[in-house]
Amino acid sequence: MRTIPSFMAFAAGAGLLLTLSGCDQLEQSAQQLLEQTEEVAKEKAREVLSETVEQLNQSVDEAQQSANELLKPETQQAPEAPAKDAPPLPPAGQMES
């Protein structure tokens, strides 16, 4: 009859070891899941950041294009030639008296 309590103690010890072993496996699985989740989160963050930068660049390009259109002269006009009937202008720096 003494073997039954010894067997029960052995079974309890084995069960405890299996439970602890299961806890280690569970901890390792949780750690792996955490690492995978972290990698997925980093990749998503990179994608979102990349899309945001692309949109920002597009907005900057559009703003630059609009600014360039506003700053360029509307038409290129040739300098006006003096009328043929008008008297010639004196050279710069000289005045008639």
Image: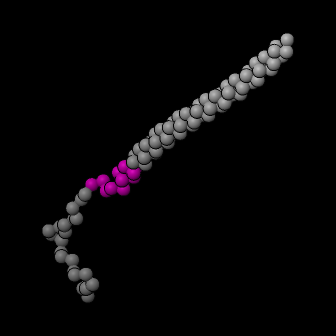
Judged left or right of residue 62, residue 86 is left
Check the image and report above or below for 74 versus 91: above
User: Which image quadrant is residue 95 in?
Assistant: bottom left
Q: Nearer the viewer, residue 50 or 17?
A: 17
Residue extending furthest left? Answer: 84
Query: What is the magenta segment's predominant secondary structure?
Result: helix
Query: Could you tell me if residue 8 is visible in this image?
Result: no
Judged left or right of residue 29, residue 51 is left
The span shown in magenta is: 63-75
Question: How many numbered marks, from 0 up?
Answer: 0
Q: How is the image coloured?
A: one colour
Give x and y (percent) for residue 31.
Answer: 62, 34
Is 73 one of the magenta-colored residues? yes
Is 3 one of the magenta-colored residues? no
Judged left or right of residue 80, residue 16 is right
Check the image and report above or below for 29 versus 61: above
| Figure quadrant of the C terminus | bottom left
Give x and y (percent) for residue 60.
Answer: 43, 48
Q: Residue at x 66, y 30 (%)?
A: 24
Judged left or right of residue 79, residue 58 is right
User: Which image quadrant is residue 28 in?
Assistant: top right
